[in-house]
Amino acid sequence: MVPEQLLVYIRQNIAAGFKKEEVAQALKNAGWAPQDIEQGFAALDNPALVEQKVQATTDAAEFARIQEELRHAQTRNSRFSETSPANAGNSTMAAWLIKRGIVKNEAQANMVLIGLSLIMLAFAAWRLL
């Protein structure tokens, strides 16, 4: 079964104009198994497979780990947080994305932030090589 989180990430990045190879490399760098990545792309190439193979729930421990990493990154990089009277009580990146209408809820904001983190990680790895 292909995790929904993986399918969403692949769909979003392909729609954003990234090549299949770039998305696959970012996923490999983030620790996804090559078999899962291949299944994810195969499922998106065949919509009938998506219906059959999509796993409704994601690995809660993995998701919690990613969220914790994002919290640490936001703490270290507080310059990315915007504090204004409108969002003084909630100055996280997720709130920033929701406030501007980029996403509709916190779950979508987290997916965007995870995707951006993976892309930045892939870019940093590429620059180091």
Image (cartoon, rainbow, N blue to C red):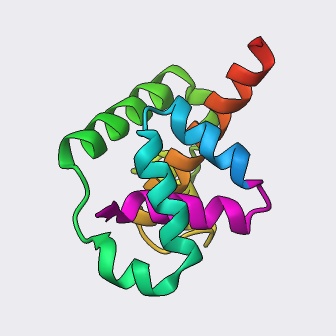
- The answer to whether one can see residue 91 in this image is yes
In screen coordinates, is 16 left or right of 24? right
The quadrant of the picture occupied by the C terminus is top right
Magenta region's main secondary structure? helix
Q: Is residue 71 above or below residue 85?
A: above
Q: Nearer the viewer, residue 1 or 104?
A: 1
- Residue 122 magenta: no
Q: Is residue 46 left or right of residue 116?
A: left
In the rendering, at what x and y percent does residue 19 appear?
77, 54
In which image quadrant can residue 18 be found?
A: bottom right
- The quarter of the rendered structure image containing the N terminus is bottom left
Residue occupying the point 53% across, 35% down: 28
Residue 39 quadrant: bottom left
Q: Residue at left 36%, top 38%?
A: 66
| Residue 55 percent location from the top left of the image | 27, 68
Residue ID at (49%, 65%)? 8
Q: Nearer the viewer, residue 48 or 79?
A: 48
Range drawn in magenta: 1-19
